[in-house]
Image (cartoon, helix red, strand yellow):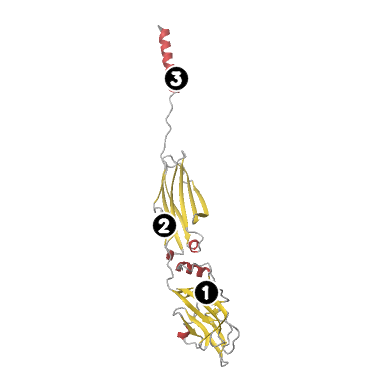
Amino acid sequence: MKFFKYAAIALLGGMVVFTGCNKEEEPTVFDDPTVTIEQGASLVLTPSEGPTYDLSLKVTIDAPGKINEIKIQRTKFLGSTIVKEDEFINQEHFDKTEATLNYPDNINFEIFFDGSVDKIVYDFIVTDRAGNLGSADFTITMGAYTPLTTEVTTGEIWKIHSLGKACWNLKEDVAVTGVGNADEVVASRYIINSDSVNTATSDPNFTGSWTSDEVNWISTNGNPQNTKGNGTLYVKANDYDYTNAPKEVALYLYGAGTPSKDVENPAVGDIYIGKLGEELYVIKITENNIDEEYQPKANTGVLRFSYKK
């Protein structure tokens, strides 16, 4: 009897061991991490609010499988082409199931205004300890620019206007004389023929160079004359989008250049941004003809241009 008793116990024990060896534990399955950006998914910048924008994103992470790594990618695009890509790894919240982080960035409008970038995308990618992924992204673009809507297509200065050196008034869109220096006359001279002109002779011809400073010349009767300008400053900007004429870009290019009262040897297609106080002008040279004659014959050479303001 004892033999059968022990045999039964041994058999039962063997069954238990056998059963235990074939039981597999179910692996723990975690939900993918979720990433939430409090500010939403995108931001459209207002061009006139530049020149910089301080970005601050609040990012919340929920990772049941515990955070292994937080990767932040900042990608700058021009169209579909990647201009620059930066990557940052944040392991400060390693092995936690929840985290909140603040991501700051300073955005210089220059990269939009000079045409090198038209979109910036921030990607927040979270990996948990089980290898699961979760992500969210935030996109920044530049909003609509303010166009310069008034265009004058009849701008021109000759070698001579009336009895003296030729000038042009960009504000009133008319040619003005270089005779006299009364305050109201000086204020009207945005562009003054800066060539060494003698109204008594036919030489030299007008090359198109101009100034807003002051110039000396000789009148028909041989008397020395002085013509003062209003001091408008100019910057050459041939890459400027004259067709759409965005005001903010014109101001940026003006600020990025070296303003001068003098413009020498302008060529057809050249673009100049002029500024006087709050007044803004974008001039495009359409013709520079040093041989065209007006009346009298001594008046030879003309510069023609259009401008937006």
Whole-angstrom CA distance, mark 3 to mark 1, is 97 Å
Regarding mark 3 in the picture, which secondary structure is present there?
helix
Q: Which residue is mark 3?
A: 18
User: Which callout, 1 or 2, points at the residue further toward the start of the chain?
Assistant: 2
Category of crowding for the residue at label 2, using alpha-carbon neighbours closer than 10 angstroms: few (below 14), some (14–19), many (at least 20): some
User: Can you tell which of label 2 and label 3 is closer to the viewer?
Assistant: 2
Q: Quadrant of residue 104?
A: bottom left
- The residue singled out by tag 1 in the image is 286
Report the residue that reaches farthest toward the right. Answer: 203
Q: Residue at x 46, y 52 (%)?
A: 122
**Of callouts 3 and 1, which one flags the residue occurring earlier in the amino acid sequence?**
3
Q: What residue lies at 42% left-to-right and 19% top-to-bottom?
A: 16
Q: Is 71 placed above or below 185 here?
A: above
* Numbered disc total: 3
* Type of amino acid under label 1: Thr
Residue 115 picture location, percent across and down:
50, 62
Query: In percent of the image, x 43 and y 14: which residue is there?
Result: 11
Which quadrant holds the C terminus? bottom left
Q: Residue at (52%, 74%) from the top-left corner?
A: 286
Amino acid beneath label 3: Phe
Q: Which residue is mark 2?
A: 43
